[in-house]
Image: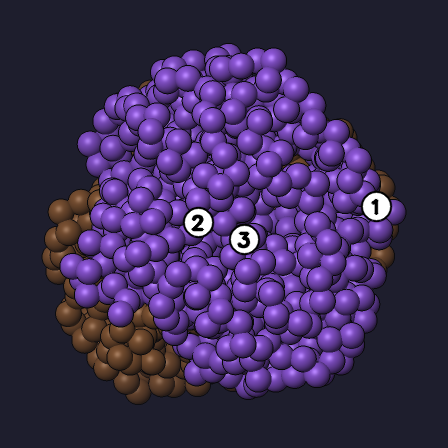
Chain colours: A purple, B brown
Amino acid sequence: MKGGYMGKFLRVDLTNQKLTDETIPENILRTWIGGRGLGVYLALKEIDPKVDPLSPENKVFILTGPLTGTAAPESGRWCSVTKAPLTGTIHDSQSGGKWGPELKFAGYDGIIIEGASEKPVYLWIHDGKAELRDAKHLWGKDTHATTDMICEELGDENIKVLCIGPAGENLVKFACMINDKGRAAGRGGHGAVLGSKKLKAIAVRGTMRPPIVDEEKFREAVRANVDKLKKHPVTGEGLPKYGTAILVNIINKHGVLPTRNFQTGVHPTAEKYSGETIAEKTLIRKVPCWGCIIGCGRYTRIPKESPFAGEGDGPEYETLWAFGAQTGTDNLEAISKANFLCNELGLDTISMGHVIGTLMELYERGRIPDEKLRGIVPTWGNAGAIVELTWRTAYRSGIGDDLAEGAKRLAEKYGAPEVAMVVRGQELPAYDPRGAQGHGLGYATSNRGGCHLRAYMIAPEVLGAPQLVDRFETKGKPQLVKEFQDGFAVVDSLILCKFNTFATWLEDWIPMLAGATGWDITIEELKTVGERIYNAERVFNILAFGDGREYDTLPKRLLEEPMPEGPAKGKVVKLEEMLDEYYKIRGWKDGRPTREKLEQLGLKELADKLEEENLLPG
Amino acid sequence: MKGGYMGKFLRVDLTNQKLTDETIPENILRTWIGGRGLGVYLALKEIDPKVDPLSPENKVFILTGPLTGTAAPESGRWCSVTKAPLTGTIHDSQSGGKWGPELKFAGYDGIIIEGASEKPVYLWIHDGKAELRDAKHLWGKDTHATTDMICEELGDENIKVLCIGPAGENLVKFACMINDKGRAAGRGGHGAVLGSKKLKAIAVRGTMRPPIVDEEKFREAVRANVDKLKKHPVTGEGLPKYGTAILVNIINKHGVLPTRNFQTGVHPTAEKYSGETIAEKTLIRKVPCWGCIIGCGRYTRIPKESPFAGEGDGPEYETLWAFGAQTGTDNLEAISKANFLCNELGLDTISMGHVIGTLMELYERGRIPDEKLRGIVPTWGNAGAIVELTWRTAYRSGIGDDLAEGAKRLAEKYGAPEVAMVVRGQELPAYDPRGAQGHGLGYATSNRGGCHLRAYMIAPEVLGAPQLVDRFETKGKPQLVKEFQDGFAVVDSLILCKFNTFATWLEDWIPMLAGATGWDITIEELKTVGERIYNAERVFNILAFGDGREYDTLPKRLLEEPMPEGPAKGKVVKLEEMLDEYYKIRGWKDGRPTREKLEQLGLKELADKLEEENLLPG
């Protein structure tokens, strides 16, 4: 194998504790690129879509892409693909840090994890060799201790560790995988899948480098991409200066910062936990991912005098929102502490903060009996509660046991399902789509459930990148959403950081990809790859639970309750105005790809499979 | 069997999941009474003293006494006896609540637990029947959830549950057993022993009653005891009005409230967490044990606005001290919250607070590297830290993993063993013995390690019960300590609440015991029972680890550093002045019973055993 790939994938059969090296043919890689794309290919090939996500029959694919660990800017990433316990959908979760490149350096392009171990184990990969090791002593340990203990016992502090915390062990539905102590493959509950398989960690270390086919061409393309990133105001200035937290004030001023579980879009005191405030009060240093020229990561500290003293990576924008506006809290110290605990215990910050907001609305409505709460009173803005509910969720202690099931199941259990602000069971993130119509369509049609990163329409609708469009307008949005969705599927497969997309796009990446791999991929072909991935994901979901139009929707609140105040006052998401056109553009009927579309994408087998199960539309 | 006993003990062989009913002959019961006494008898008979306390070879004896569940005042108690993981000594731990009497009502006098289960189980005892049930779904749950879930699945909310929390499962060296959600067999780590055996809980319910041999005699004796309790200012007024927390101000005023890890005996702001303050600010209701006429138990609530919001049983005096003065904290909200968490997670409050104080002194001395702390800064009086360190200890998270080993191992690990304020590895409780010489001798010679309840010399030395003696004087103290130690061994065997001892003593209990059992025991015989128990315990320790004079000591600080301020200023414990006399009175040499003494107590076999192992003195 050549070009960005080492030619080696590791199959880990946990049931039989057996490790095998495999090669994935180059034509498959070119068809699916890597990362997320390769993940859905493998999922459709190897996972029965109807499987229980927490059973040994589910699999986890840990993947890199052709640009991972190369000099391509913002390429220090990896992703995990699995059937997610939170959503029951196909699900990819992306992470930065230093672990992804190190997996390459250790000699592997990806890992296929199957079965389940009887006893806790961890995987140790180094310079082309791999072994399973006993992890009994690591079970129960948080992500920091696990990382430190593995480095110590293997005698090398430069080892990079991906692991789960107590939340993953306890099968919390939104437990994440943490690498490098503070980076998360956050959403969907991938950590719980590892927990169900008793795979505590994957430690990697090595000196190998992915081959580059045309060094000169590649170097030149990299230079051009770096130039554009440095010159763009977002990637060259905003993100380096304040990190993603720069968004708090911007999004709030646009009236789309979801506040108190999406009851409004304005949090009057959000300034107290903005990027600017962090820079002034709690910032210790930047923490860039491997080879990153932006450096959006932050390491912060809450002083010892605070009841929420602590330090660690974060908080990012989404986290600030989740523990902040979503719970009505403006206490930066408590928000940061909850973030640190999520990193240590292995929880997705978006879902964790979101679910606490769900609990608060249920409590406000009198749905939560006092005896469930042990004296914690989940009222809006209760700083102490957000911290305590976080560790209780990781350990499933008290009401935390209910929170651990996610917003949908929580709201259903307490008799008010309409309180759950979810799409396909995944908690919505930090943008109220009533003030960004395209973003709303993106949420509704996201294959992995409520997500801002399938089609980050906030860029054109709010931030003006690549150019500003009318955010309250629905016209033209379906086309834009489709293009973003497909393009982002490519980004997630290459794998590049999404921040590239502020400054560069497919045409900029093609020369890098060509330089690395030698593949003469055109823009049209790359767009098709993105579309193929999006359609393949949808097919997985259709086979899993009959995905389709009834799931392409939003919580009632966003469709029917007008935004009560602020610049987006009076707006709802006019989803129905966009959905039919979106389907038309996609070549779908009622949320399902037609045979024609699938065959056009080279997915005839999937069309046959859908037909077999009577799931092919009209 | 007759008189206070049902005639039935349950042997639970966890290795083979086998349950057997057994009868212990009446002559054995009369020799050892029950509870603590019967426990040491069984331990010497069935446990190899050299066994690892957390191995399947250790056993746990859950015992009642001849007065448990009868109309005898303050008899709603039970005890656990085992070889303790915190100390390596023989160890009894006593608890109140409603569980002990209910075990009797369920038809059993006691339970002998041996071996270890492969998978988590719980024991269900009801009206003379017993069964082991799967506890997989309960593993990881805290004590409140465990209790609720068992009551729910067995369909009876009046079932009484004794269980361990996450701390016991995680083998925290001072994990306790919790019954009735807020009552603890607290000290020594009995919860960890159950955890090592994978026995999550013991649920009991029944309608049987222990037989009374002479109803009339018994009733009359009970009446006399109740009278004395009601008339005594401590049991008739002080304890009912303020609970044990009444002691905070009293002990502080005497300058013996150990502050900042026994660096001084005065905590200037202790008033902020006194019994009087609790009564005014946080008290919700009293929570008396079964059949109790004092009702010292308290249920309190910290309001939702506090970062430490919560509610639950406690805090008792010892807990107020441990999280208060010992850590230099005067924040009642944080102290109470730490208490609630101990109840839920299954931690001994005395050791937990004490160990946090140990950490704080180690930190003050620069012994704890910052990277161990994750931003928690354990400075004296840091309210947030005491709460966070509590849950972290139960889950062995971060520095909590070190705290979970107890003060002795913590101080040793960080290179300052002299910081550990322990006797035989057990953290000292809430009285600085520099201002109560007899109490100091009691600490030093306590068979289960640092404990105020082996010989509560604070009663005569500070509280004036039965009459005030000069607390700074050593003369006469050895005799008094010996009498208290033996008397308290009887109380723990009957089993009665120690608060009886403020108002009544052996001569008052004999008629109750005689009425219940028909035994014509004299005062002299009862005193001998107490002495027999104390000596038998010491023999267990000698066989276990060579107990003797070198262990009958106190931390250097208490022997050499004069109290720096307050009414006890300038004092140290003059232990050497008392120890030889104490040994002489006990018939011991260098901390070990002579053959003569053992034979006099009917323990010839133990003398033979000591001789065999070359451990008999002189």
The lab-note entry on whether marks 3 and 1 share a chain reads yes
Q: How dense is the environment of label 3, judged by Cα within 10 Å: few (below 14), some, or many (20 and up)?
A: some
Counting from the top left corner in percent of width and height, residue A464 is at 75, 55
Q: How dense is the environment of label 2, judged by Cα within 10 Å: few (below 14), some, or many (20 and up)?
A: many
Residue B165, picture quadrant: bottom left
Under tag 3, what secondary structure? Answer: helix
What amino acid type is highlighted by mark number 2? Glu
What amino acid type is highlighted by mark number 1? Ala
Residue at x 39%, y 47% (from the top left corner): A532
Under tag 2, what secondary structure? Answer: helix
Q: Nearer the viewer, residue B154 or B295?
A: B154
What amino acid type is highlighted by mark number 3? Glu
Spatial CA span between label 3 and label 2: 9 Å
Counting from the top left corner in percent of width and height, residue B613 is at 30, 22
Counting from the top left corner in percent of width and height, residue A51 is at 25, 54
Residue at x 43%, y 42% (from the top left corner): A529
The residue that disc 2 covers is A531
Q: Chain of mark 3?
A: A
Q: Chain of mark 1?
A: A
- Tag 1 and tag 2, C-beta contact below 8 Å: no
Q: Is residue B219 visible?
A: yes
The residue that disc 1 covers is A279
